[in-house]
Amino acid sequence: MIILGIESSCDDTSAAVIRDCILLSNVIASQKVHEAYGGVVPELASRTHQQNIVPVVSEAIRQAGIDKSEIDAIAFTRGPGLPGSLHVGTAFSKGLALALNIPLVDVNHLHGHVLAHFIKEDENTEVPEFPFLCLLISGGNSQIIKVESPYDMEIMGQTIDDAAGEAFDKCAKVMGLPYPGGPHIDRLAQEGDPKRFKFSKPHIEGYNYSFSGLKTSFLYTLRDEIKLNPNFIEENRADLAASLQRTIIEILMDKFGKAIKDTGIKTVAIGGGVSANSGVRAAVQQYCDRRGIKAFLPKRTFTTDNAAMIAVAGYYKFLRGETCPITAPPFARVVI
Ligand code: KG4
């Protein structure tokens, strides 16, 4: 079965082709236009999607070495995401599905991130066994998800305020680093002392996360230190980055570890943009190695938004005959 996946929920226009979960192509056009603004500008994102979507889809079909008449269904991100951005992918997918007279499958973007672990680069790619626990950490979400099957996922805990990626990005911004700041913090942290600064950690019940207190404590540290030394940030970049990253990882692992212990599940996975972080990857791997737990860390291309994961999530829905009508609107928030 050949599925074309289309992703346009935020600032990456992506199209991918899979044959029964085996990846034939995955083309991603990232939008540089937002860098100058220090964050994604929704209107610019949707306009750039409009420019990119036709060449990106054509290139994905070309690289897959198939003819568009061979596509069995189109899987598209229906939400959550930016309304304008979602509209571009949704409208394009509908148009193409109508023209090719094939079914449409609507995909929840977050299911896509979780099911990214089922993208096979060849027949030998190892995939997680069910049930597994997934730590989904991105610019918009921080969730612990119990995955019983491709159709059955339970959110055990999630952030009550900022997401982990926002903590990286907002703190990086006050340090004067470009957007998105996560990868810059990751790079700087390699050379810094992670124990140099202490920032506050939340105390919340259960498996929920909170990152806004950390952000405030980071801001206050900078404010107080800059009063004493105006070059404080400049002189302490690496130590600030390393200490911030360590604190975020400790917050993440505290609840994720608790969920792993309480459920007794022996397979875990991570996903979303922040799962590209080298410290997060090392911490999850080390935690699992010590306890005989199997860890699935996605390839970096599959951590951020991509259409391959949307195609795979769509594939599973299509197997059960779950298609969506041509009238289906995108959802900015509602989870499908
Ligand atoms: O999943 P994603 O591409 O989409 C959104 O949710 O928007 O995640 C983007 C997030 C950003 O916050 C970015 O700073 C973060 O992932 N990120 C990282 C790293 N690479 C991307 N955070 C920390 N370390 C990284 N290496």
Image: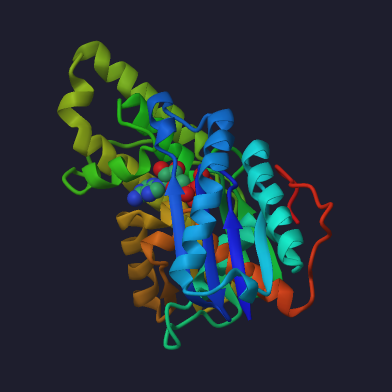
Residue in the picture at 27% in, 39% down: 241
In-front residue for pair 50/237: 50
Residue in the picture at 54% in, 38% down: 162
List x then y, in percent, for residue 192: 18, 43
Side (left or right) of 10 relative to 183 = right
Residue in the picture at 74% in, 64% down: 104
Can you say whether 120 is above or below 231 in the image? below
Residue in the picture at 58% in, 31% down: 42
Can you say whether 165 is above or below 308 in the image? above
List x then y, in percent, for residue 156: 65, 60
Side (left or right) of 137 relative to 230 = right
Question: Is residue 137 visible in this depiction of the protein?
Answer: no
Question: Is residue 180 visible in this depiction of the protein?
Answer: yes
Based on the displayed image, in which of its 4 quarters is residue 263 positioned?
bottom right
Can you say whether 70 is above or below 54 in the image? below
User: Where does the N terminus fall, quadrant-wise?
Assistant: bottom right
List x then y, in percent, for residue 219: 38, 24
